[in-house]
Each structure stands twice: as structure tokens, then as C-alpha cells.
Image (tube, rainbow, N blue to C red):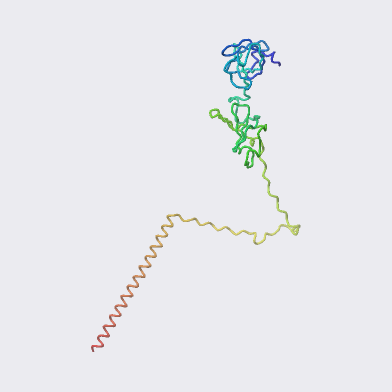
Amino acid sequence: MSESSLTSTELKPKTPVTGKVIKTALGGALIELSDGQKGLLHISQMADAEGKPVNRVEDVLKVGQELNLWVKRVRPEHLELTMLKPLALDWRDIKSGMVVKGKIVKLDKFGAFVDIGAARQGLIHISEMAHGFVKNASDVVKEGDELDVMVLDVDRRKRQIKLSIKALTPEPEREEAPARPEHSSNRGRGPRKPKEEEFQMPVEPSIPEPTAMEILMKEAMEKASAKQKYEKREKARAIKKVDEDQEEMLTRTLENKVQTT
């Protein structure tokens, strides 16, 4: 269907159209589309040759000028037009799990920024680039790469879009270690008997580590036991000394009696 055959009921936002300026004013311009419909182009929807906003309509438009435009909004009474190319994705269009096409526009140490046609660029964190370890984003992508990415999360309040390459690639299967071939000398002889050193000794049950309280109690008991032994030895020495003193006194007494007789 050509643009000239579109009616106002068939026109939708973001539809490209062509038109001619038929009147200008301070706040905008009246545009006649190629199919004869009329549309309004507000000054806020105008841009100069570099894509920058304009302050005066006459700086960029004049009566009779042909324009390439897009439909911004369809109203019952008129069309609203724009010179600004609409975004491919509005915030309300972006959903978690959807797959979109994007272009790598910037690399950073923690990932890559991707233009997916939204108001903000999305971010592929370095952990979402591949299933294995990725040291640098440049090891996987480079600026200018165009690729499919999956939307992991979108936060309209923070204006953040999290993307992933990893989610679109199958996880590699882990390679199993090859079976160890049997020695040729054992072929045809039945199962090999395990060597004596291949038998594993039963693991001794681990002894739980004593708690701090148990250690303190043990030390206190050992000190008390040592004190008791010390006191017992000292007591035995004292008794022995008393016995020796008494025996010495008895010996002296007997010697004195012998001398006096």
C-alpha cells in the first residue's frame, strides 16, 4: 500500500509520510500530506540539518517546502506529525524475555552498551556475554557489531535495560573424561583383581574439637590435680621431717643418759 492511499484511520504512530508546508506560524506549521490530509507539525517536533531542536520555525521551514515526516499521534480532528525519527522501541514496548536486534556502540570494563532503538542504550554485563569466564568485553564483541540480544530486565523508573547474549546461546556440554583402557596383558583373562594398595583403608571417625569451655575446665582440673599432688608431697615431707626430728631428739636423749650414768 502506498503512502498516498493511506487514510487517517489507517495511519498509525511511527508511519512515515511525505508532505508539503502550506502555512507557518510561531508555534508550528500546517502540513498537507501527499494524500490530501492535513497535519500539524509543532515546533518541538522540528529539527535542523544536524538533528538539533530549533527556536524559530522560519529557521528550518518555508511555505511550499517538501518534508519527510512521521506520524506522531492520530487524533479524530487532525494528525500530529514529527520531523524526529521515532524510536523503534518505546518503554512500554520493552518486556523481559523479548529478543531484539542491537548494535554495540561502546565497550567498558564491565560490559558493552547496545543501541536497540530505545530511549536509552541497554547494557550487556560482562557476565552475560558467554557461558565461560570473560575477562574483557572486547574478547567477545567489538564496537559496530550488530547482534540479537535478550532483554533480561527493564526498569522504567531508573531507565535501565539489562541485556544478555548468553541467554541466546546453548550452554556447552561438559566433556567426560575418557575411560581408561585395559592393559593388553589382561585381555581375555576376566576382571582384573585389584592390587592390595588399591584397597582404601576405612576412614577413622573424626574426633570433634573441644570447645573453649571444655578446654578451660580441663586446664582447671589439671591445675587442681597438680595442686593436690604438690600439697600431698609437701605434707609427706613435713611428716618425714617431724619423724626425723623426733628420732634425732630421742637419739640425743639416750646419748645424754648414757653419759650421765
Q: Farthest residue in the front direction?
A: 59
In which image quadrant can residue 21 be found? Answer: top right
At 62% across and 58% down in the image, what residue appears?
Answer: 200
Q: Farthest residue in the bottom direction?
A: 261
| Camera-nearest residue between 2 and 205 | 2
Question: Residue 153: percent from the left, percent from the top?
Answer: 58, 32
Question: Residue 218: percent from the left, percent from the top?
Answer: 42, 59
| Camera-nearest residue between 41 and 177 | 41
Q: Is residue 222 above or below residue 90?
A: below
Question: Residue 169: percent from the left, percent from the top?
Answer: 66, 37
Q: Is residue 136 above or below residue 248?
A: above
Is 193 on the left or on the right of 152, as rendered? right
Query: How many numbered marks appear?
Result: 0
The quadrant of the image that shows the C terminus is bottom left
Q: Is residue 146 above or below residue 73?
A: below
Question: Residue 56: percent from the left, percent from the top?
Answer: 58, 16
At 64% across and 35% down in the image, what residue appears?
Answer: 165
The quadrant of the image that shows the N terminus is top right
In which image quadrant can residue 43 be found? Answer: top right
